[in-house]
Amino acid sequence: MEFKYWLVLTLLGAIWGSAFIFIKIAAPEFGAIPLVQARLVIASLVFLPVLLKKEYLQLLKPAWKHSIVLAITNNAIPFTLFSYGSFGADSNILAILNSTTAFNTMIIAFLWLNEKITLKQVSGLILGFIGVIILVNPESSTTQIFSALLCLVGAACYSFSTVFIQKFSQTMDKFVLIGWSIVFSCFIMAPFTFYNLPDVLPSSKAILSATWLGAVSTGLAFFGYVYLIEKIGAVKTSTVAYFLPIFGIIWGAIFLREIISIGIILGCTTILVGVFLATSNKRNKIPRELHAN
C-alpha cells in the first residue's frame, strides 16, 4: 500500500480517536442527548450541500428505508450510549471499548450471514473478552461497569450496522445511504432533545468540542473514509479500527491528563490482539463500512 494511503489512514484514526476526548469534555455541559443532537445537526450541515445535488437526490429513493435503519443503529443509539458512557469512564477507555466493534462484527456476520468462524477467530473472541474484563475490573480500574456496558452495546450497534450494509446495500450508493442516515438522525433525536435541554448555555470549550465532533469526526472524516475505500478497498480501510484505541489513549493523556495505567496498557493490548486474531481471516472478513465515532 502506498505511503499516501497509510498517511490518510493514520490521520483518520487520529481524528476518530480524538472524538472520545471531545465527548468527555462536552457531555457534562450539554447532557448526553443534546450533545448527540448538536453533533448530528452540525454533521448534517456538512453532508447536505453534497446530498442535495441532483445526481445524489435521485439515488435517495432506493436507499431511504435503509438510511432510517442506519440512522437509529449507527447514529442515534450508539452516539447516545457513548455519550452516557463518558460519565463513568475516561476517554481512553471509551476508545478501547469501541475497538470491540471489529470482533462483534464477526459474531453478527456468523449469526446473520452464515460466515464461517475458525478456531483462531474464536481464540481472538475469548482474548478480547478477557481484555474487556481487565479494563473494567473494579479492583484495578475506575471505570464504572454500567458505563462499560453502555459502550459495549454501542459498539455492537456499529457492528450490526456494518453487517446490515454488507447485506442490503450492494446496489446502493454508500455516500447517499450513510449521509442521509445522519440527516434522518437529527429528526429522530429531536423529541428526546427537547425534553433534555441543558439548564444553562454550555461553555465555549464545550461548544467547540461539539463542533469538532459534528464537523470533523462525524462529517469531514467520512469523506476521507470514502476516499480510502475507493482507493484501497474496504478490507484494508477497515484497519483504521486498530488506530482508535492507540490515539484514544494518547489524546486522553495529552489533553485530559488521563493516567495510562498498567491495567489500561494490558487491557488494550489484549483486546487489540484479540481483534487481530478474530478478524485476520481475510477470506471471511466483513469489511467495516462504518466508523465507531
Image (cartoon, rainbow, N blue to C red):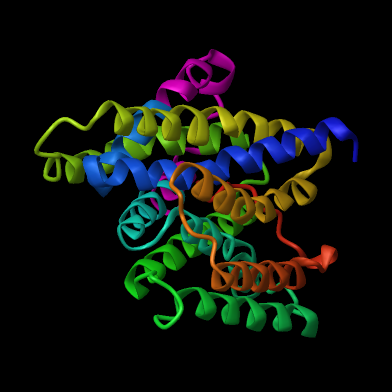
Is residue 13 rendered to the left or right of residue 230?
left
The x and y percentages for residue 197 are: 14, 39
Q: Is residue 55 magenta?
A: yes
Q: Quadrant of residue 110?
A: bottom right
| Most common SS among magenta residues | helix
Is 103 rendered above or below residue 27?
below
The x and y percentages for residue 175 are: 59, 32
> The N terminus is located in which quarter?
top right
Residue 61 seen in this snapshot: no
Total marks in image: 0
**Residue occupying image coordinates x 55% and y 31%:** 176
The x and y percentages for residue 211 are: 39, 28
Q: Is residue 42 magenta?
A: no
**Residue occupying image coordinates x 39% and y 69%:** 143
Q: Quadrant of residue 245?
A: bottom right
**Residue occupying image coordinates x 30% and y 56%:** 84
Is 269 rendered above or below residue 139?
above
The boundaries of the magenta stretch are 44-73
Residue 22 seen in this snapshot: yes
Is 286 rendered above or below residue 233?
below
Is residue 81 rendered to the left or right of residue 199?
right
The foreground one among 168 and 18 is 18
**Residue occupying image coordinates x 59% and y 17%:** 55
The foreground one among 51 and 23 is 23
Furthest residue in direction right, as rendered = 2
Is residue 122 rendered to the left or right of residue 267?
right
Is residue 144 rendered to the left or right of residue 230?
left
The x and y percentages for residue 179 are: 50, 33
The foreground one among 10 and 250 is 250
